[in-house]
Image (cartoon, rainbow, N blue to C red):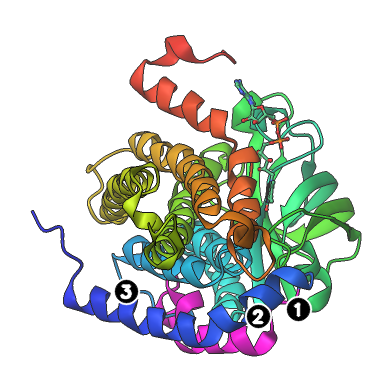
Amino acid sequence: MEFRLSQEQRLFRQTLRDFCEREIAPLARQIDTERSIIPDQLLEKMAEIGIFGISIPEEYGGSAPAGEEMVYGTIAVHELARADMSMSLPVYALLCMGWGSLIVKHGTEQLKKEILPRVATGKYFLGIATTEPTGGSDVANIRTSGIKVGDRLIINGEKIFISGVREAFELRDGGHITLVRTDPEAGHKGFTMVFIPARLPGATYTVLDETGRRGLSNGTMHYQDVEVPEHHILGQMNRGFYLNMEGFNLARILVASACVGMTERALEISRDYVRQRVLFGRPLAKFEGVSFELAEDHARLEQLRIYLRYTAWCADTLYKEKDFISQRELSRMVSICKMTAPKIGAEIVQRCMTHLGASSYMKECPLGSALQGVMSYLVGAEGGYHIQKLIIAREFIGEESVPYR
Ligand SMILES: Cc1cc2nc3c(=O)[nH]c(=O)nc-3n(C[C@H](O)[C@H](O)[C@H](O)COP(=O)(O)OP(=O)(O)OC[C@H]3O[C@@H](n4cnc5c(N)ncnc54)[C@H](O)[C@@H]3O)c2cc1C
């Protein structure tokens, strides 16, 4: 049993930490203040050190460490979130990484050649579009339709709360892996996942005003008779429900890692503050009301960090050893991470803010925007808090616990 990161992985982490402290941390406040304004130059530098290529094999322009993509991905996202605690930049990167991985695994050769080299540059945004106004949690209820006509899918419908719309449609270029209904009679066996480039005739978007994560846009997308070539379909027609689960298994590990990285940094900020802040004649750290909270929170985060690393390793191993575990077993572990990381993160950041007092409430301090950022993952992004419990219950208790059957 080997729990250490390998020498290469530790070197990668150190390189990234230096890069993030030098290039990202000084821009973090600006990224969170001005909307949708992650600088192109920064994306270029991130691409140069290989961040956007982590899940993409060399033959498609990436630098994937074969068989260790998720472990490397979690390291990268962790470091990004330490530097940009508002989470905008980590989310931009993790969406490209996680959903890029699904294209690597299930895209047609033509699609991989068209899209992946551009994703690896960091300037072609790749996102996910499942949520609709009828409710994001009830995925089986989505209405956006895809009708096969010749060698095209004709898409009609609407998606909402989608990350990266402005980046994909206007600021740069990009597109979203989109879940559409292709057989209305077949229940959950009637969905297909298809990559839809943003700039197709009939596709339009609007931007919504988010309270946090303001460096990355969020909005609605509308499709009116949008024609998508059939080589953009991922996997087989009508297998989209299962691919959706697989994609979320990858993306949610990265999400949890972003939450852990951000929370680790929040605890360090609080630790540094209570060491030097003198009140009632002694450092704040001498008061157990403060130091015991920090000790507890450090312990909670350590446990989560190790379990998350194990889950990332399981995800990598699943693709190397076919019978290792099933996607459903992996979902249970991933949902434990996705349920826990934003919850613990939000609780810990709030306690850290309390330790810092009023200075935590000023814009100079990153803890306020960190709290807004992490809340996005508690209220719903990449699947709501309670939905993770549904998945864990389904796998632990069994089908008896499933409310929708
Ligand atoms: C910042 C941000 C970015 C996002 N980016 C994307 C994106 O890029 N692509 C995309 O497709 N979607 C995105 N989403 C949407 C996200 O996927 C949805 O928020 C999520 O699926 C929940 O859907 P909903 O918001 O419609 O809430 P609802 O489905 O209406 O659920 C409301 C609440 O009820 C809970 N709930 C639901 N069912 C049950 C149940 N059976 N038992 C108990 N509780 C339940 C949910 O956990 C949630 O807390 C984003 C959301 C946010 C906030």
Q: Earlier in the sequence, mark 3 or mark 2?
A: 3
Q: Secondary structure at mark 1?
A: loop
Q: Nearer the viewer, residue 95 or 305?
A: 305
Write down the residue under mark 2.
Answer: 123
Quick check: marks 2 and 1 in contact, CB under 8 Å?
Answer: yes
User: At label 2, which amino acid type do we have?
Assistant: Lys
Q: Is residue 255 left or right of residue 200?
A: left
Q: Is residue 366 left or right of residue 68?
A: right
In the rendering, at what x and y percent does residue 93 appear? 55, 69
Write down the residue under mark 3.
Answer: 65
Ligand 1 lies in which image quarter?
Answer: top right
Residue 39 on the magenta span: yes
Write down the residue under mark 1.
Answer: 172
Residue 135 on the magenta span: no
In the rendering, at what x and y percent does residue 48 appear? 49, 89
Disc 2/disc 1 C-alpha distance (Å): 6 Å
Quick check: marks 3 and 1 in contact, CB under 8 Å?
Answer: no
In this rendering, the answer to whether 22 lies above or below 233 is below
In the rendering, at what x and y percent does residue 171 appear? 80, 77
Task: Give the residues in magenta.
Answer: 37-59
Residue at position x 59%, y 46% in the image: 377
Disc 3/disc 2 C-alpha distance (Å): 21 Å
In the rendering, at what x and y percent does residue 318 appear? 29, 49
The outermost residue toward the left is 1
